[in-house]
Structures are given as C-alpha cells and as structure tokens.
Image: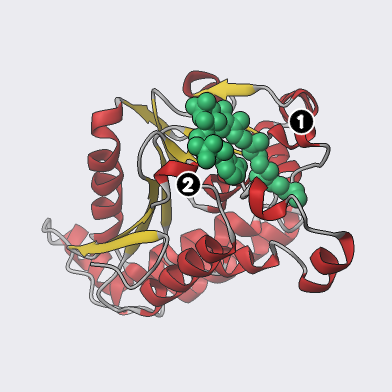
Amino acid sequence: MSDYETILTSVDQGVATITLDRPKALNALNMQVLTDVTDAAAAFDADDEVKAIIITGSGKAFAAGADIKEMSDLDFATAFKADWFAGWTRLTDVRKPVITAVNGFALGGGCELAMMGDILIASTKAKFGQPEINLGVLPGMGGSQRLTRAIGKAKSMDLCLTGRMMDAEEAERSGLVARIVEPEELLATANEIAQTIASKSRIASAMVKEAVNTAFETTLEQGLRYERRLFHSSLATNDQTEGMTAFVEKRDANFTDS
Ligand code: HXC
C-alpha cells in the first residue's frame, strides 16, 4: 500500500518502513524521491502508531546517488535559488529513531541519505562511497560533513578525493556502520532493532536521539550540560516512574508516554 510514486511504505507493529523503489535507476534520488521520502517520514513522525522508521532500498542498491540525469542540465542559478538538496533537512528533523538498512550501493546522495538516519546497518553486499569527484563536483547532501564526523578526516578525504567504494567490513571498521548482516537477514535485523526501540519509552528515545545529535553541534561542556538538563526533564515523565518502579518490582515496564 503506497500513496507515493517512488517509494513503498508499510507499517507493522509500530515500525514504519520506507523502501526506495526505482530499481531500474538503482534508486537514484530525483526530486520526486526527495518529496516522497520526506513527506512519508514526516507523516510517520506525526503518526502515534509509529515508534521507529526504517529506510531501505529495493533491488541491488540502497541508492546510487542523486539522479545524475536530472542534474546534468542543472545550472548554478537554479540550484542556488532553489537551495538544491536543502529539502532533505526535513528527514533529519524527524524526532523518532530512523534506521537506514543498506542493501547494496550507497553512493553519493545514497551514502548521504544512509548517514541521515540514526542507526546504519549494512548487508555484506553494501558498498559505500562519495564518487561525486568523478562527475566533476563534490558531495552536496552532507557527505563531506557527516562522513568526516563519522569516520574521520583521513578516510573521508580518501573516499571523497578518490571516489573509491568502501565495502561493509571497512565501513563497520571505520565507524560508519553499526552492524553487518547477511543480505537475507537485513530487513529482519532492522525490524528487530526497531521493535526493540519501539518497546521502550518513546519520550526517552526521542531524548536520546536529541542528546546524541547534540554531540555533533556543540562543545563538550555545552553538550554535557544539555544532556544533564534532558536527564533532569526525564524525571518528570510517567515513563521514568514506571521504568524505575518496574525495576524495583522485578517486572517488565509498560511505557505509556506518547
Ligand atoms: C541516475 C543512475 C544513477 C544515478 C545508476 N543509474 N546510478 N541514474 N543517477 N546516480 C542508472 C544507470 O544510468 C542505468 O540506467 C541503471 O541505473 C543501472 O546502472 P548501471 O550503471 O548499468 O549498473 P552497474 O553497471 O551495476 O553499475 C552500478 C554503479 C553505477 C557502479 C552504481 O551505476 C554508477 O557508478 N552510478 C553512479 C554513481 C554516482 O556517481 N553517484 C553519485 C551521484 S552525484 P540505464 O537507463 O542505462 O539502464 C550525487 C550527489 C551530487 O549523489 C551532489 C552534488 C551536486
């Protein structure tokens, strides 16, 4: 069931899945994909039934990048005026946990989209790269920034300057990928992670997401203070009372804050 042109969507037991679905173009990210993914993610973020979101790709790619055919005639004035690619910020504004499950090529904008999630898991067939240099341009959806924060300057420069691909093992070793699994287990593992998150306090997971992301935006001192303030706020929730009472009573917690 999907109201979208370029993606498939489904919801199962509180977990929403968005599947990029332009397999003939290796799920290249054209403007319609941007609209569809960000609309769907915003709708799921607002849907009380949904507690976590998975983004994956159909076929042999997660996404092979921004759509080169769409961009080949793009000129500076048009791109600058429209602030091309800025629309993806709507995805990083999502407050629920987002798992990106990379099944194959995650190149250019595809790697950048994978990095917009909160937990990146990869199949053994995944390949990551920022090959924009081969097209005479550079990353434009966060590659030079998020990749550098994730794997450090040495590897990021290596990938962005040579355009080479990195396999799943190297990506995990470098800190880009949280877990690697066999291709046939990718979606089940993503679902398992999402279900685990969905069983926990919704408000606490939103606070965790905000706190970890703040680490990329502030000094350590500011970040630590922000974390403490969020922790103090968590003491005002029903879920904190329930979580700690359940521990003391040696039973499973039943979190209800939405
Ligand atoms: C549009 C794409 C595409 C892309 C693949 N296709 N990647 N179309 N944009 N990014 C299309 C091909 O044209 C082809 O269509 C079909 O998908 C299958 O691709 P093949 O090349 O035949 O497959 P294969 O030989 O398996 O090679 C896979 C690949 C290669 C290694 C991933 O497709 C590739 O190098 N793609 C481009 C990767 C890339 O440069 N990405 C970065 C894009 S720039 P037809 O119709 O011929 O069957 C970017 C950010 C730009 O993301 C930001 C700065 C402005």
Residue at the spot x=29%, y=68% of the render? Answer: 2
Coloured how? secondary structure
Q: Is mark 1 within 8 Å of ligand 1?
A: yes
**Disc marking residue 27:** 2
Residue appearing at x 64%, y 59% in the figure: 214
Q: Quadrant of ligand 1?
A: top right
Residue 149: percent from left, percent from top: 70, 41
Viewer-side residue, 158 vs 87: 87
Q: Position of residue 175 (x, y in %)?
A: 56, 31
Q: Quadrant of the C terminus?
A: bottom left
Residue 142, placed above or below residue 80: above
Amino acid type at circle 2 is Asn
Kindly identify which residue carries mark 1: 134
Task: Using the image, determine if residue 170 lies above or below residue 99.
Answer: above
Q: Which quadrant of the structure image shows residue 247?
A: bottom left
**Three-letter amino acid code at disc 1?**
Asn
Between 176 and 109, the one lying in front of the other is: 109
Q: Position of residue 254 (x, y in %)?
A: 17, 68
Q: CA distance from mark 1 to mark 2?
A: 19 Å
Q: Which mark is residue 73?
A: none
Q: Is residue 37 left or right of residue 194?
A: right
Q: Quadrant of residue 49?
A: bottom left
The quarter of the picture where the N terminus appears is bottom left
Residue at x 36%, y 78% (from the top left corner): 237
Give the mark nearer the N terminus: 1 vs 2: 2
Q: Position of residue 128 (x, y in %)?
A: 56, 31
- Residue 146 appears in the figure: no
Q: Is residue 219 visible?
A: yes
Q: Is residue 194 left or right of residue 171?
A: left
Quadrant housing residue 111: top right
Q: Is residue 206 left or right of residue 87?
A: left
Look at the numbered discs 1 and 2 and tell me whether their residues touch, using CB distance below 8 Å: no
